[in-house]
Amino acid sequence: MAAGSAAAVAASALLALRPAGDDGFPTDPVGVLALAAASTGTAVAAARLTAAGGGRRAAGGGRAGRLASWLCLALLAYLVLAAWAVQAVAADHPTAAVAVALWSSAWIPPLALMQLTASAAIRCRGGRHGRTGASSWRSPRSRSRTPC
């Protein structure tokens, strides 16, 4: 799985900076490992949600799968931008200000995509109503008899 490999590379880059003297928030081992695990888990969820959508455009699973894929990429981008920012600041590189500015705002896309993915994942499959609750958790046979 490419997302797991990319998350491992970004996480190892950040974790390698910790013993080098950077003990700030971006290199905190718990946070780095949590973001790497979230990115990998989101990739698995994206594959399952895409398969649940069955390729139909009206199905909520297809949309949720696409959003989960974007969420996975946003989490990976957050890790990569954190590594770039920490390395640029440590090396006193001219791009340090840009790297820190990008990393500082990189939390916004994952937050928005997380909300959109959750919303799309709980909507009725194939229904236009988008209702949630007990009616959306019925078995597929009961959905064929009653509308969502």
Image: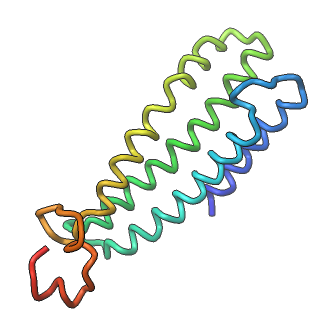
Query: Could you tell me which quadrant the N terminus lies in?
Result: bottom right
Q: For this view, does 33 lie left or right of residue 2?
A: right
Q: Is residue 10 visible?
A: no
| Residue displayed at 90% across by 31% down | 19
Residue 133 vs residue 17, the one in the foreground = 133
Query: Could you tell me which quadrant the C terminus lies in?
Result: bottom left
Please give the count of numbered marks on the rendered protein: 0
Residue 75: percent from the left, percent from the top?
A: 55, 43
Q: For this view, does 114 lie left or right of residue 134?
A: right
Residue 50 lies in quadrant:
bottom left
Residue 24 vs residue 85, the one in the foreground = 24
Residue 31 lies in quadrant:
top right
Q: For this view, does 126 lie left or right of residue 94?
A: left
* 71 relative to 96, above or below: below
Residue 12: percent from the left, percent from the top?
A: 78, 43
| Residue displayed at 15% across by 69% down | 127
* 54 relative to 79, above or below: below
| Residue displayed at 80% across by 15% down | 91
| Residue displayed at 72% across by 50% down | 8
Q: Residue furthest front?
A: 134
Q: For this view, does 30 lie left or right of residue 122?
A: right
* 73 relative to 126, above or below: above
Q: Colour mode?
A: rainbow
Residue 56 vs residue 117, the one in the foreground = 117
Q: Is residue 1 visible?
A: yes
Residue 143 lies in quadrant:
bottom left
Residue 48: percent from the left, percent from the top?
A: 45, 71
* 147 relative to 47, above or below: below
